[in-house]
């Protein structure tokens, strides 16, 4: 019994550590092409098929278009379609909404993938207080550096 409990605890700790690494890498991915590549590699290596992991993988597909020379449009379309499908299946997941908002904020306007910025921003503000401490911290860090939020909106996150 103790072995089983230890195994489950170790598994949960391993998964959380990996997700924390993915989040940290994602937060830095837009700073340089090297950081983008590091995030893409980390996201693609993630085991599991949960919605959040798949959301980061979809974002990695979109971000790959930033560093490759060909098939950019297809990469963005594939990643955006996947991300939209994941969010459609998990509309109340704040982390997925944060991923989509950050992608849409940073993608060139000419691509046209910017239709959910306002909705995701409102969702983050309205659902922030319902999250655990880890997600609150992650969301708050994103909001504080985001171009989409006003100072008054940032001040509402406590």
Image (cartoon, grey):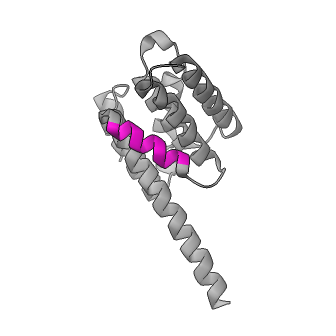
Pinpoint residue 142: horizontal percent, then vertical percent: 37, 39
Most distant residue in the front direction = 70
Quarter of the rendering containing residue 148 = top left
Q: In which quadrant of the rendered view does residue 33 lie? A: top left
Residue at far bottom of view? 2
The answer to whether one can see residue 140 in this image is yes
In the displayed image of the protein, which residue is found farthest to the top?
110
User: At 52% from the left edge and 67% from the top edge, which residue is drawn?
Assistant: 14
Q: Nearer the viewer, residue 36 or 115?
A: 36
Q: Determine if the magenta segment contains residue 51.
A: no
- Residue 55, above or below 70: below
Seen at 53% across and 26% down, the residue is 119
Q: Which residue is found at the position 66% from the left and 40% from the top?
A: 90
User: Count the marks: how many?
Assistant: 0
Q: Is residue 129 above or below residue 3?
A: above
Per the rendered image, the range of residues in magenta is: 34-44
Residue 154 visible within the image: no
The residue under the point 44% across, 56% down is 20
**Which residue, as the protein is rendered here, is positioned at the far right?**
89
Whether residue 14 sits left or right of residue 83 in the image: it is: left
Look at the magenta stretch and give its main secondary structure.
helix
Residue 60 location (% of width, % of height): 50, 36
Q: Quadrant of the N terminus?
A: bottom right
Q: Position of residue 91 (x, y in %)?
A: 64, 37
Q: Does residue 42 belong to the magenta stretch?
A: yes
């Amino acid at each position: 019994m103790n072995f089983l409990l230890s195994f489950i605890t170790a598994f949960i700790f391993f998964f959380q550590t990996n997700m924390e690494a993915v989040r940290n890498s994602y937060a830095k991915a837009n700073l340089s092409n090297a950081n983008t590549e590091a995030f893409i590699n980390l996201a693609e290596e993630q085991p599991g098929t949960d919605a959040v992991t798949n959301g980061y993988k979809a974002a990695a597909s979109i971000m790959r278009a930033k560093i490759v020379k060909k098939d950019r449009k297809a990469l963005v379309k594939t990643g955006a379609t996947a991300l939209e499908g994941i969010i459609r299946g998990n509309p109340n997941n704040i982390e997925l909404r944060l991923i989509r908002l950050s992608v849409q904020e940073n993608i060139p306007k000419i691509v046209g993938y910017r239709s959910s910025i306002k909705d995701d921003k409102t969702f983050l503000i309205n659902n922030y207080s319902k999250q655990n401490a880890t997600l609150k911290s992650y969301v708050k860090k994103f909001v504080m550096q985001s171009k989409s939020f006003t100072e008054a909106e940032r001040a509402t996150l406590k």
